[in-house]
Image: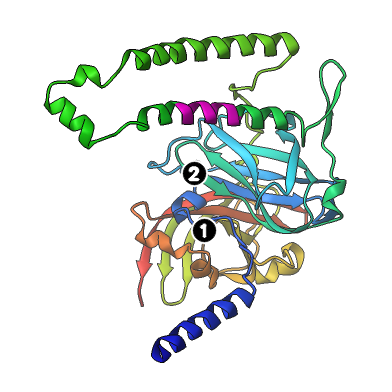
Amino acid sequence: MKSLFKPWLLAVLCINVLLVLTVPAAQAHGEKALEPFIRMRTIQWYDVQWSTQTFNVNDEVSVSGKFHVAEDWPISVPKPEASFLNISTPGPVLIRTERYLNGKPWTNSVSLEPGGDYEFKVVMKGRLPGRYHIHPFFNLKDAGQVMGPGVWLEIGGDPGDFTNTIKTINGELIDMESFGFANGIFWHLFWGALAAGWLLWWVRRPLFISRYRMLDAGLEHELITNQDKTIAKAVLVGVPVLVLALNAVTANQYPDAIPLQAGLDRILPLPAQVNAGMVNVDTLKAEYNVAQRAMLLQFSVDNRSQGAVRIGEFSSSNVHFMNADLANLHSKPGKDDVSNNGLSLSDNTPIAPGEQRTVTVEVRDAAWESQKLDGLIKDADSRVGGLLFLYDEVMGKRYISSISAAVIPKFN
């Protein structure tokens, strides 16, 4: 007994220590789970901003920004013929009140056009206090979720102060937090009890062995009694009649109810914001050095604008690699997904108007590994994609190109 007591005591002590330790909250929503080629070459987010990151319960917060639907859409990913923009949250910490695409109110799924540019805005309301990691994301039919850039939101206040009151068509004010709750609980219990009663009616008698012996003896007609048939007929007729009768009562009580919408919105893309033709970029080569965690990209840049331009940023899968010489003008301080020194050029001088130049860009940063983007060299579709930002510092203009190329891995 003494020899057994010590191991059990040690196990209990270990369990107590584990219970005391603080369990860290989840800080991500699977944004790294999708294959890199999907994250890089489907929805390319940029200029995503939050109206505020600190607010209280009942206060409104909005996220707005733009995205480009990549022309080089992966062949193994279904086209975005049905897509839904939503907000990824750890539970019901916010409620969505408004949503816009290209300035138009938007409630359903939407069909996106590869090569199209879109602008979005989602308005929400604080519901539960706390600190949460939030993302906008697109849910692509048959493909999964493509996450946008995430931020930490601080929601203060008292959860008991939250209100979600709306006015119906007939002018009645209802609280959406409690409206229909008791009715929903009743019908769940009702149908659960009916299903349980039906199941218990059949399993109350001996099963398996006894039934098998009756079947083997040719007495299968005795397995179902006349009473069983009567009850089955009553259920078969009673359930549809009950459903239709209650539906009629509900329709009579709420004659102006609007059904849930199941349409597909058709919203045309904006005039070209990316690949607009003023500065054309052609990707000539892409190599990834595994040991150095560096992507080497060779571009042919044709400057058709009226001012000199410089390459300032490469963005891929919400990670921003900045040109150090332009970091003071275009850096994004305070963000974990920004590398202000991650981009270097073979020729960093401005590209003059009318000039066509071949430029080699090295994008070197540990983010390739930490964001699991280096996994693209192991994918069946080993192509890199992203947005290249060029700036005219004199005229204050920005030009964006969506780039893609097959990646050649280098191991030395």
* Vertical side of 289 occupied by 50: above or below: above
Quarter of the figure that contains the C terminus: bottom left
Residue type for callout 1: Lys
Q: In the rendered structure, which disc, 2 or 1, sits on the residue that comes first in sequence?
A: 1
* Image coords of residue 359 (percent x, y): 52, 63
Position of 113 with respect to 398 (left or right) is left
Residues shaded magenta: 188-197
Residue 301, by quadrant, is: bottom right
* Image coords of residue 161 (percent x, y): 87, 47
Question: Tag 1: Cα neighbours inside 10 Å, few (<14), some, or many (≥20)?
Answer: some
Residue in view at x 36 percent, y 56 percent: 379
Q: Secondary structure at mark 2?
A: strand
* Distance between the alpha carbons at the discs numbered 2 and 1: 12 Å
* Image coords of residue 388 (percent x, y): 59, 55
* Vertical side of 5 occupied by 236: above or below: above
Q: Secondary structure at mark 1?
A: loop
Position of 145 with respect to 331 (left or right) is left
Residue in view at x 63 percent, y 13 percent: 246
**Residue behind mark 1:** 32
Residue 21 visible, this angle: no
Residue type for callout 2: Gly
Residue in view at x 60 percent, y 56 percent: 318
Please check the rendered image and state whether residue 392 is part of the magenta-colored stretch, yes or no: no
* Image coords of residue 147 (percent x, y): 58, 50
**Residue behind mark 2:** 144
Magenta-colored segment: predominant secondary structure:
helix
Quarter of the figure that contains the N terminus: bottom left
* Vertical side of 141 occupied by 372: above or below: below
